[in-house]
Amino acid sequence: MNHDEYAARDALGLAECVRKGEVTPAELLALAQARCAAVNPRINAVTIPMPEQAQAHLKAGFDGPFAGVPFLIKDIGQEYQGVATTLGSRAMRGHVAHEHAEVTRRFIAAGVNIFGKTSTPELALKGITEPERFGPCRNPWDLSRTPGGSSGGAAAAVAAGIVPMAGASDGGGSIRIPAACCGLFGLRPSRGRVPAGPSQGEVWEGASSEHVLTRSVRDSAAMLDAIAGPDVGAPFIIAPPAEPYRDAMQRDPGRLRIAYTTRSPIGTPVDPQCVAAVEDAAQLLRGLGHEVDEAPPPIDGMQLAKSYLHLYFGQTAAKVRAVRQLTGASGAEFEAETRVLALIGDSISATDYVSWRLRWNDYARALGAHLTRYDLLMTPVWASLPLKVGAAQLPAWQQQALKPLLALGNRIGTGHLLRASGIVEQLAIDSLQHVPFTQLSNLTGTPSMSVPLHWSREGLPLGTHFIAPFGREDRLLQLAAQLEQVRPWFDRRAPLV
């Protein structure tokens, strides 16, 4: 098998070749590693190679639906015993995981051969992937642009043909955003569908979910079958699907009622090409017999953004503290933006944090009611084209201006001063203006997906976003499979490929 033949198959297709004896797992690994050596210097997607671990897997042998398929895991939340976990941060110096994450165990049980870890922004905090520790990750469709984040390294690696799928996670859009940027399929499972253990019960109050980024819908469905279900000590058990997702996705979705909106929930502009992508999808869906109405959910988008940001601030502060305790790192080893977020988080009272957390129920009830009248909600993923690398970074002059303030820490109540200045409202605009649509699914715990149905005039992928009722990944996969059949994207490859 050569690389063209390797790239022409999805993960299940490669596993089938292994089962038929057409290629060996060792040959697949060599192809993946050669491809990584050829393109990774240009995209900077794989930051921690794991050749010894991959060779150990070859000796142990493989079983499962993806037996022998090369695979990459994300450098946060998917810990691998004995391998460095950096979280994209200089502060995680010298830290080595003492056990596998449960999702990593399940990836291995599904038969994949893990040979590296992919880049993430520091602490997975951004919709771009430009950690100071490793440098920016780049989009194979346009090397001057971001692959999105926080699973940007995973998306870039798949889009560049290194692997057919890679581990990812989504706490605010981090599967769907890079899927949209890189022309991939990205499904975010329902809260609790995939375990976060053993070191955590729920990540970000349950707002974050683990899964994969793929080129085909069936790979996503089959991997969800392999990794779904509670682990020991899970905080709750979500009802299992009525049948395996790989079987369910092959069923016709029937005539769906689909609500859509292209208006930013926080009132910021949406690029006309992003609007056109959703309008085009609406026409495609109507042609397939679905009922499509413009009907935004009755939710205050700015209030939801503030709820999300209070989670964001509080979790950042707690994570910074935990990392410092774990590694002995100084605060100065974190990026300036991370330190600002942590200062704000430290200034939020427990009462305020809980008050904003309780609002999640309001959003879940309102979306739930909306999805009794409709089967799905459709929106853009991005409100703009994928950003240029560096465009969303804090300018150097601002970083310099912040240094004296950051040096003081919270000794003068810096976090309270920042909050009183109106920075929370401004951050809601600045940090979410490009990706204001995805957090709704995270706070409500609902499954959602980005489907690569449209490309911009510049030749950049523009994903279309769908949200389903809680627990209805099957409905999303059925529609995705239908769309994949009528408007296939698998053979649309990035110029780098």
Image: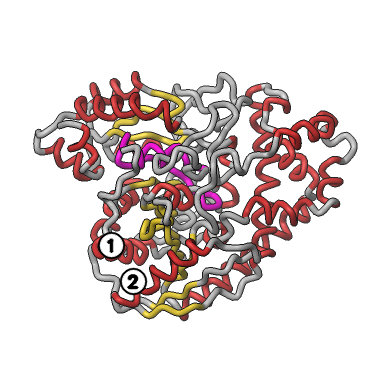
Residue ID for mark 2 = 284
Instruction: Please name the residue shown 43% across and 61% down the image.
Output: 464
Q: Residue at x 42, y 63 (%)?
A: 471
Give the secondary structure at mark 1. loop
* Residue 371 point in image, percent of width and height: 48, 74
Could you say whether the residue bearing mark 2 is in a helix, strand or loop?
helix
Q: Quadrant of the C terminus?
A: top left
Residue 296: image location, x then y, percent? 54, 74
Q: How far apart are the alpha carbons under marks 1 and 2?
A: 9 Å
Answer whether labels 1 and 2 touch (C-beta < 8 Å): yes
Q: Residue at x 38, y 68 (%)?
A: 281
Circle nearer the N terminus (1, 2): 2
> Is the residue marked by circle 1 packed among few (<14), some (14-19), or many (20+) residues within 10 Å?
few
- Residue closer to the observer: 204 or 468: 468
Please tell me which residue is depicted at 50% across the width and 45% down the height of the picture: 148
Q: Nearer the viewer, residue 324 or 262?
A: 262
